[in-house]
Structure formats: C-alpha cells, structure tokens
Image (cartoon, rainbow, N blue to C red):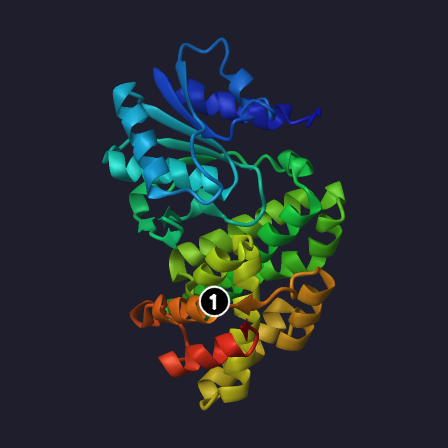
Amino acid sequence: MNYNNEMFINQFRDILIKNKPAKILFVCSAEYDRFGYRHAIDGLETEIVPFCDFSVNPEVSDVKKGVFLFKEQKCDFIVTVGGGSAMDTAKAIKFFAESNVKILAVPTTAGTGAEVTRYAVLYNNGDKDSVRSYDIIPNYAVFDYKTLASLPRFQKIVTGLDAFSHAVEAYWSVHSTQQSREYSAQALDIFNGVFMKFIDGDESTYEDMMKCSELAGRAINIAQTTAPHALSYKIHKFKGFYHGHAVALCLLYIWKYMEENSSSDKLDTLLEETARVSHFTPESFKNLLISLGLHNDLTLTHDQFKEALEGVNIDRLSNHPMRFSLDDIEKIYCSFLDIV
C-alpha cells in the first residue's frame, strides 16, 4: 500500500539528522518497514538494531529482552513506530535501562496517546504491571495520520474508544486542571464529529482522529485515568477483549452507577458537564456499544469474578470523583457481567 506519507517521512528524517544517533533501537512490529520509516533511515550515518520481540500486550519479560539488546548493542537513540504496544515497550525499555536516551515516536493508531504520556502499560503473566515517569515521555513525535489507513475497522473502533475513555476519565479525575479539561473537551468534540466516519474508512477524518487521541493523551498525562481503567484490566485478561473494548464497557457501567447513586451536588454537576462535553449519556453510549457489537459475551466464572474483585486496588481509585468500596465495585461488575 502506498501511504503517500512523504511529508511525515521527511519530518522523521529531519529529527534524526538533527540528533545524529550512531545506533538506533528500532521498536516496532515484525512488519516494521511497511510505512517506510525503516527505509527512511537508509543513507544516514546510523546503524539500526530492530526489536520486534514483544507481544500485543507487552510483558515485563518482553521489555527485559529489549533492555538487554539496547545495552548489548550500545544504542544511543530509540525509534518506535506502531500502536500503544510498541510505544509502551520502547518507553519501558528506556525506564528499565535507566538511560537518558531520546525517543522518537510515530503512532500508527488513534487511541492510546502513548506518544505524549508518562505511562507505559505492561503486563506480568497477564496482570497489569505498569511504570510511570516523566522521563519516558517521547522527546519527539511524528503524527503520520496516513498510517491509519492500515487499520481494520474493529481496530479503529477499540482504539478510538480508548481515546474517548481517556478524555472522559481525565475530565472526571480529581487531579484534573483547567488545561486537562480543555484537552478533554477538545478531544471529545472531535470524537463526536468524526468517529463514525472514521471507523467506516473516511480518510478525511484520519488527521482529526489522531489529534483526538493526542489531546486525550495529554489530558490523562496531567489528570490520570480513573475507575474505568482500574476495573477494566481483569475484563481484558479474562475475556480477551481489546483494551479499549474492556475500558469502554467499564466506563459505561461506572458512569451509570455514578448517576444512579450520586449524593452530592458537585458530582451531579460533573455528570451534567460530562454529558455536555462528551455529547453522550450512559444510555446513548450503551446504544453505541451495542451497535458496534461490543456488548456481547459478558460472562465470567465465579473464580474469575472473585479474582477480578480481589484484583482492584481501592487506593488506586483515589483519583476517581466518587469513592468506591468493594461493595460498590461488586455491584458495578454485577450490573453488566453474568457470573456462571
């Protein structure tokens, strides 16, 4: 496929020419030259060390392999081209290598916003085990929205919903600021205007949708995510749902629970603002998920349900605007999961 992305390739080369790296750790999928970025390095006085040995949900063990390669080859720069998995892996390699190396990120999905955040989402035998540091935020990003043409429709759906969830959760967060809420509101306005056209392959929406993802990423980088992300990881683990799918389901039913159990004018106001800036209510968001085929197969075994409950760290929900007890969490899970 010809992506007609020469403008972005040139931006990419200019950044490398400016930095003059001697040896680049190139973190991306096995098909790492399909967008032209590997070929773009040809002719520069730099060596490439490819690292593709990581899973879709990168494990700590994957990162350790990358750290070993980074150190063994004495790399002095990191390039990552891909979705959240590639970018999180690259960021985590820098973190665990304890290096001040610079990172150049080229996102190829519109959802994670990982190119602008201090988080690297990792897993340890399937359970979330992430890192965070301002030092791992990529130093450079090339927003090549032309690459979004490569995404299957379902991948557009789940990554787009991840961006939506980031924006809503950052708006809710007790750590939100005027700046983060502006980012959230802008992201949600874009989402409302282009998401359905985006998932149906309208190329005129690609630039806007990548901007939506970036803005939502900037919002969570300030405010952090809240309860929907915290409750989603076991759903992701047990159901095999994509991250954005699991988060969107948890967001819906947490949102619904908040509306039904609000006991303060402050929370009522926040929920009213959420409906205004997101252009959704819990009911209309549920209808969206149903229409996208994301509201099916919501069963867990009793053992899985027990692990899901025990796996939620209440302390990590301290940035959510409504305090949740374990009983609240159980009620939220039971409002959409069938326990068999």
In this rendering, would 156 be left or right of 237? right
The N terminus, quarter of image = top right
Residue 30 locus on image (x, y percent): 52, 27
Q: Is residue 184 something one can see in this rendering? A: no
- Residue at figure coordinates x 70%, y 66% from the top left: 290
Out of 298 and 103, give the one closest to the viewer.
Answer: 298
Residue 184 locus on image (x, y percent): 52, 61
Above or below, 130 relative to 88: below
Above or below, 305 relative to 225: below
**What's the amino acid at mark 1?**
Pro
Quarter of image, res 328: bottom left
Out of 227 and 212, give the one closest to the viewer.
Answer: 227
- Residue at figure coordinates x 44%, y 39% from the top left: 87
Residue 339 locus on image (x, y percent): 52, 74
Residue picked out by circle 1: 228
In this rendering, would 64 be left or right of 194? left
- Residue at figure coordinates x 44%, y 59% from the top left: 233
Q: Is residue 287 something one can see in this rendering? A: yes
Label 1 element class: helix
Out of 339 and 180, give the one closest to the viewer.
Answer: 339
- Residue at figure coordinates x 50%, y 21% from the top left: 13
Residue 149 locus on image (x, y percent): 69, 37
**Neighbourhood count class around disc 1 (C-alpha, 10 Å): few under 14, some 14–19, many 20 upward:** many
Above or below, 306 relative to 203: below
